[in-house]
Amino acid sequence: MVPLSWYLILAAALFCIGVFGALARRNAVGILMGIELMLNAVNINLVAFWRHIGPDQMTGQLFAIFVITVAAAEAAVGLALIIAIYRQRNTVNVEEIDMMKG
Amino acid sequence: MRASDLIHLLPELILLGGAALVLLLDIVWLRRAEERRRQLLPYVALGVLLVAALGLIPGGGDNVSVATMLVFDPFALFFKVFALLAVALIVLLATPYMQTRTPFSGEFYALLLATALAICLAVSASNLVMIYLSMEFLSITSYVLAGYFRQDRKSGEAALKYFLYGATASAVMLYGMSLLYGATGTTDLAGLVAGLSSGAAGQSAWLVTPAIILLLAGFGFKASLVPFHQWAPDTYEGAPTPVTAFLSTASKATGFAILMRVFLVGMGAASMASQWISLLVALSVVTMTLGNLTALRQTNIKRLLAYSSIAQAGYILIGVVAVVSDSTRIFTGINGVLIYLLAYLFTNVGAFAVVTAIEDATGKLEIKDYSGLVRRSPWLAGLLFIFLISLTGVPPTGGFLGKFFVFGAAVQTRMWVLLAIAAVNSVVAAFYYLNIVRYMFFVPAAEEGEPIRVGRPLQGALAITAVVTVLLGLIPGPVILWASESARSLLLALR
Amino acid sequence: MNQFPLLSVITLLPLVGGLILLALPGARLQKWWALGVSLATFVISCLLFVWWKAGEAGMQFVERLPWVPQFNIQYYLGVDGLSLFLVLLTTFLTVLVILFSWEGVEQQLKPFLALLLLLETGMIGVFVALDLVLFYAFWELSLIPMYFLIGGWGDAHGTYNFLGRTLSWRVYAALKFFLYTFAGSALMLVAILVLYIRGGTFDLLALQQIGLAPNLQFWLFLAFGLAFAIKVPLFPFHTWLPDAHVEAPTAGSVILASVLLKMGTYGFVRFCLPLFPDASRQLGPWIAALAIVGILYGALVALVQKDVKSLVAYSSVAHLGFVMLGIFALNAQGVAGATLQMVNHGLSTGALFLMVGMLYNRRHTRLLADFGGLWKQIPIYGFLFLIVALSSAGLPGLNGFVGEFNILLGAFQMNRAYAVFGTLGIILAAWYLLVAVRQMLHGPLNKAENMAVRDLNVREIVTLAPIILLFFVIGLFPNLFFDKINPSAQAVVDALNRPQPIVSMAVDSER
């Protein structure tokens, strides 16, 4: 059986990649993908912990399913916002979306 | 969960039904109706809020836990009343404003009711899963509200930035939650404190600090604490003004409510408390200082109020870090936070009501556009002055009461350095608040303008906020009692 | 008699009158209404004097109601010999100031008068409040109207670049005034909270009994003292004062100099000495030394002023130094003399500002060099100005002398060197005032503009006459006043020298 720590390391790595993507990407869709990676890291964590702690309690699984669902809703709203911006300015580069400063 | 538990969920159910009703009314009945009948919609929304408030009476605050997910205690009750009040005021603010700017004002009110529902759930949530779900519910509705003017570039930009920062913050927070779950095997707040402080303490104690930091990203985002505040200025400036008022008061208060519940209930053990307290002290100092210093050089009034709102979050945090477990004390820290938030609600919504009135009439939002306001509209200038001195913390206003209580708590716990920094900060803040006063009263207007017409609903909002702001300073007794009583249920969890 | 809430009426009447004023139409009616309200307030406040119980040191006309009962905050008013005359001074000068403003305030008369009345409420409240929260509320309340008076009705000339913003001078002065005072009061608020957590009450008289550890007293004294020192202003916290005085409209300058500054000195006597006796003894000599520096500095700077209004402003720094010296002589003579001197300075400097304002209304200049030989042209003005200047300089027979003499006697008992420097200050005061008199009134009447100046009219003489009458009353019958001041001053000093019971209030913090 694969030990817990492997899962955690995988999740941590995934999370870090996601954070990097969210911070370094200039394309709004790219940032959104980074965020999705972070959420998937969370899901791996949750399911791995659930398996490790005791499968009779469904908390971890449940949490993961909620995260997946909500992430979908979030992505839907986020993409809608990105499309609205794209229609206005023909760009989704966050560096060019800078009307307000100060 | 039993059927009888539903009585506690009455306000939430009413809000849910009400939001659906507003949406339906808008689509089925009002969309093609003439203009006059469509103006009924905000009053329907107000009616729903009123009924929801009545729904709080049967099962509001009697310390019941439902389905291990929600707890109905006086603390939650306080914030539910708070949320209903806040959303009602926002409805008043939005009423002429939104209808003249977008053809889709029906959904707007439905979304506002949904945010009230989200806040009601969030402040009752006693389980990490529920906290995540309700916060995300609030966030997603807020993203849409911030970007409500689809044709407006600023509004779209505001929403996008809010969304990107918000989604990142919530993902970071979730990672922290997953670690906590792994360490304790539970997501229940009460179980969390037991799991972290007992048994497996040796293995999981190291987890507390990273988990706190990760969680803070989520809560700090909602409460606009530095360094999770970057979204706030742009979003506040770009979002429709009533939405900005909402984000800076109700949404911020929710962040604080969750932060207090998670840290006091979930990590209330003394060994953990010392960790998050020292972390929050640092956040408080950075938040108020950075907020105030940046506010000094703002020229847009919404942006200025955004930075001021960040700074105020720093003051509020003083109450959280100065918490004492003894609920017989006068200053328990938490009651200071509640009082401050309530005073800030009326003060800041009032300030935004004036901003809305002026924006509605002139479309202008720069501070220099407020020149000579006293000649043009003495009432608006006078009211904004009241709100500004309340933000400064001058008696007899609610803002003073709030400062009095959080400073009192800090004195009680002997946080002298923090107090000194806060005192200096409040003088800095006085400077930029007075700068607005200076334009309104002392700088002559560039051009003569008509007196500003203010619609009835907005007049109502202005009257309520101004009267309450002053009354909180003159007759503070009842609110102090209410806040202290509400804080007690949380303090019991602190060990 | 005790049933009648005399102090509340005096305190709140101007506020109510000011609010009604806002609804009144027509400048004429507004002026008469404001005058009527202030006059009524003054007449009622004279009842304090009439119904005074002689020889009593404690609080009289006490009113006490719970305000926030859960937290022991009270609506608690009272006067004793230390505050009686300051209340009377406030009500008296407000009448005169409104009378002065009959002409000359061209625009926005209604808010101007309303602010004056609001300010009166704030100032009286400060002098009669015996609950710390109430006191703090009135303290801040007096700040806001003054801010508007300076910023809204001050002299519009010049700009100042401050933090990247171009402010007109008067707005800069108003802002400086506000921020200085607000900074001081922020610390005071913290100190009030510390006292509350120690003593469990905001009641000033009860807090005097709790006995604080000397170390804590030291810090609290500094926190309160800074707020008061800024207000006084004690050297080196005086830098806001010349700006505020020079920029303020005459009415504002009069109120500022005569009453608002007294809130600082009064604060020292009422709060710092009784609440922190050990710290007062420990820090007293240092503050007295600062007061001496203020006396000499103010006098020397006044000597070189070209603008007569800033001359008067700097003379205030010097005079208030005397008051501080009297207080921190820490004996009954000094405290009583200082208390009377607060009133004297209020009258003399108030009258000086009024007269400068009257001249300014005619000539629209305040530069000493623009005047000369005015005595020939306007003899009534010249004569009255001379009396006022002599009163300010402390000529025997006039009011200034009585106060300064007692202060110097008090200072002499404490430390002879202080008295010597103080006397030097009096000489300097006579010098700069006589220089001003000479440059304005004597010499050749050689400037064309000065030859058309009209003398004082009846209204202006009526405005000045009561003050000048009081100069002589105080100067010739000082015991009329000392009789009422002395018992309270003695009580303050007695409490100061009584060994304090150190009761450690076990209200320490724990989580």
Image (cartoon, rainbow, N blue to C red):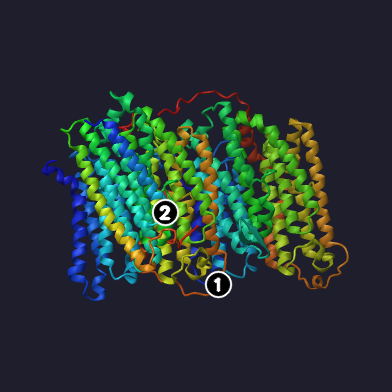
Please give the name of the residue rendered at 70% of the width and 43% of the height, measured from the top-left corner. C235
Q: Secondary structure at mark 1?
A: loop
Q: Residue B363, relative to residue A66: is it above or below?
A: below
- In the rendered structure, the residue with mark 1 lies on which chain? B
In the image, what residue type sits under mark 1?
Ala
Number of residues whose C-alpha sits closer than 10 Å to that of mark 1, classed few (under 14), some (14–19) or many (20 or more): few
Residue C29 locus on image (x, y percent): 54, 69
Please identify, in this view, whether the residue under mark 1 or under mark 2 is nearer the observer. 2
Q: Secondary structure at mark 2?
A: helix
Q: Residue C33, relative to residue C472: is it above or below?
A: below
Q: Is residue C260 left or right of residue B34?
A: right
Q: Residue furthest left?
A: B3
- In the rendered structure, the residue with mark 2 lies on which chain? B
Residue C267 locus on image (x, y percent): 60, 41
As drawn, the label of residue B37 is none
Q: Do the dots labelled 1 and 2 sit on one chain?
A: yes
Q: Which residue is mark 2?
A: B232
Distance between mark 1 and mark 2 Cα atoms: 31 Å
Q: Which residue is mark 1?
A: B446
Task: Choose between C384 and A86: the one closer to the eye.
Answer: A86
Q: Residue C428, relative to residue A29: is it above or below?
A: above
Of callouts 1 and 2, the N-terminal one: 2
Number of residues whose C-alpha sits closer than 10 Å to that of mark 2, classed few (under 14), some (14–19) or many (20 or more): many
